[in-house]
Image (cartoon, rainbow, N blue to C red):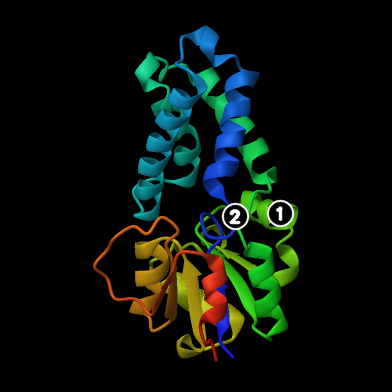
Amino acid sequence: MKVLFWDLDHTLWDFQTNSREALAEGYKEFNLASYGVGDVDEYIESYEKANTWCWKEYREGRMEKTELRGRRFKMAMEPWGLSDDFDLGEKLGQHYIETSPYKTNLFEGSIEVLTELQNRGHRMVILTNGFDEVQYIKVEKSGLSGFFEFVITSDSMGYKKPHPKAFGLALEKAGVEAQDVVMIGDNLEADILGAKAVGIGQIFFNPHNVPHGEEVDYEVEKLSEILDIALH
C-alpha cells in the first residue's frame, strides 16, 4: 500500500479562491480605491503576477521568506505608483497573512477522496513549500488535519521542492523508501519532476489540462480520478 505525499496549495486547498477572497477584503479594508488603485479585479491581477514572480524567486533560492512577504505587495502597487508606500504595503501584507490561511475553500472532491484513501489504509503526509505559521492553520481550519500523519514544510526542512533533499528528508521522517511513495501535486516542476528525480511515483493534478511534454506516471484532471489508480 503506497504512502501518499500530498501537496497542499493548488492541490487540496484552493489557493486561488481563498487568496482572492482575502485580497478583496484587504482592498475594501484599506479603501485602495481612494489611493487611485484600479478596481478590485485589477488589483488582484497585479498582485497575482507579482506573487508568482516572487515565489519563483523564492523556490529557486534567490529570495528569502521575509523579503517575499513584503515585496509582492510593493510590486503589486507599482502600476499605481505606490510601490514606495512602505506603510501601505506592510498593512496589506499583514492583513493578507492574518486572513488568507483561515479561508476554507477546497478543490472539489478533496474530503471524499481523502476519506476513501484513508479507508483503504493509505498513510498520508502533506509535503508543502509553504510556511509553517500559515500551512498548519490552513490544514486545521479546512478540516484536513485528520487525514494526515503530519505536515512537512520547506520552512521546517530548509529545502524546497524540487530539491532532492526536500524529498529525502520527507522520506526519512515518514520512515519509507522512495519506491513505496507516490507524490500528488499540481506543480509539474516542484512536485512531479522533483519526485520523479528521486524515484518517487507521481500523480500530476492538472485541473486546467495545461499541455506539457513530460512523462509522468499518472495525470488527473479531477481529484476523484485518483481513486481509479491502483496504488498498491
Question: Would you say 115 lies left or right of 171 here?
Answer: right
The quarter of the image holding the N terminus is bottom right
Tell me if label 1 and label 2 are in contact, CB under 8 Å. Answer: yes
Whether residue 150 appears in this view of the structure is: no
Q: Name the spot of residue 107 as percent of width and height, x first.
A: 59, 56
The quarter of the image holding the C terminus is bottom right
Q: Residues within 10 Å of mark 1 (few under 14, many from 20)?
A: some
Q: Secondary structure at mark 2?
A: loop
**Is 15 above or below relative to 69?**
below
Type of the residue with mark 2: Trp
Which of pointers 1 and 2 lies earlier in the amino acid sequence?
A: 2
| Residue designated by label 2 | 13
Question: Residue lying furthest left in this view?
Answer: 213
Q: Name the spot of residue 177 as percent of width and height, x first.
A: 50, 89
- Residue 212 or 150: which is nearer the viewer? 212
Name which residue lies at 65% across and 45% down: 101
Q: Secondary structure at mark 1?
A: loop
Type of the residue with mark 1: Ser
Q: Residues within 10 Å of mark 2 (few under 14, many from 20)?
A: many
Name which residue lies at 47% across and 16% down: 85
Q: Name the spot of residue 60 as percent of width and height, x first.
A: 34, 55
Question: Would you say 216 lies left or right of 129 here?
Answer: left
- The quarter holding residue 100 reads top right
Name which residue lies at 36% across and 53% down: 61
**Is 179 above or below relative to 142?**
below
| Residue designated by label 1 | 142
